[in-house]
Image (cartoon, rainbow, N blue to C red):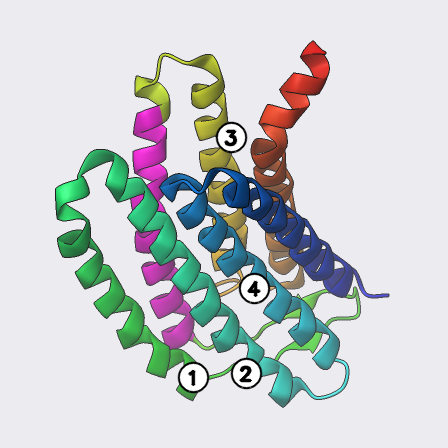
Amino acid sequence: MPFGIISFNLIAIFLLFSAFLVFFSWRKEKGLFLRDFTLFLFGIAGASTCWAIASWFTLINPRMAGYFHPLATLIGGIGFLYFCHLALTFVVPERVKNTLTPLIFLFLIIQPILWLNPPTPSISEEGIILWNIAFLPGFALALSGILLAGLPLAIFLYLGIKSTERFVRWRSFLIVFGITIYMGGGLAHNLVASVKQYLISDLFTLLGVIILLFAVYLKRFLKQKIT
């Protein structure tokens, strides 16, 4: 089986596992943090699932596979908007709506660009998925992705530095680190061109998901270590 298909499916499985783990915690506690974080995780898990499905369709119908890319960005973007909402409630709860409005507007603007210019992915001889994304949709997605991810990540980094609780600090840093690597690898797919660059992007995305999964599971892991 091509490595590209394996990596995209593993990423989707890991993220879905993380999303359901947080979802079951939210059902018990019903907190705002867990609600928004659950929706965020299901957003990026849904996006990764679309890319995983697209990787399979690349073997059958590349043109159809290409339409899973804008669908993935739509679902993932909604997830990141919830992540922004979550982060903003910690620092400027009275300005959440005013800050989110331009981000939502930007997100809506790039959607036609992505849907009108879907890629036609292919598989290299090395088994790597080449998305073949055109410059305009790739640039638009990278720019919006940096803004939607950069704002909440900067806030979480600030909260982690500010926190006096060791667990909160470590979890914040791991979440920031994991999502940064995941987004770096994911957004790089929109800009890279060579097989080697796609492979590095795949590996970074997978590594980011593993770190994020560890951050989500950190509390249970520490409890098991203590007991």
Q: Is residue 34 visible?
A: yes
Give the amino acid at mark 4: Gly
Q: What residue appears at the point 13 percent right and 55 percent down from the top-left corner?
A: 98
Give the residue at mark 2. Answer: 67
Neighbourhood count class around disc 3 (C-alpha, 10 Å): few under 14, some 14–19, many 20 upward: many
Q: What residue appears at the point 53 percent right and 57 percent down from the top-left corner?
A: 42
Q: Mark on residue 46? A: 4
Lower sequence index among marks 1 and 3: 1
Which stretch did the figure color magenta? 135-159
Q: Mark on residue 115? A: 1
Lower sequence index among marks 4 and 3: 4
Q: Estimate the x, y position of residue 34 in percent, counting from the top left.
A: 45, 42
Q: Is residue 181 visible?
A: no
Which SS class for mark 4? Answer: helix
Lower sequence index among marks 1 and 2: 2
Which SS class for mark 2? Answer: loop
Tags 4 and 3 touching, CB below 8 Å: no
Lower sequence index among marks 2 and 3: 2
Image height of 43 relative to 92, above or below: below
Q: What residue appears at the point 47 percent right and 67 percent down from the top-left corner?
A: 75
Give the residue at mark 3. Answer: 174
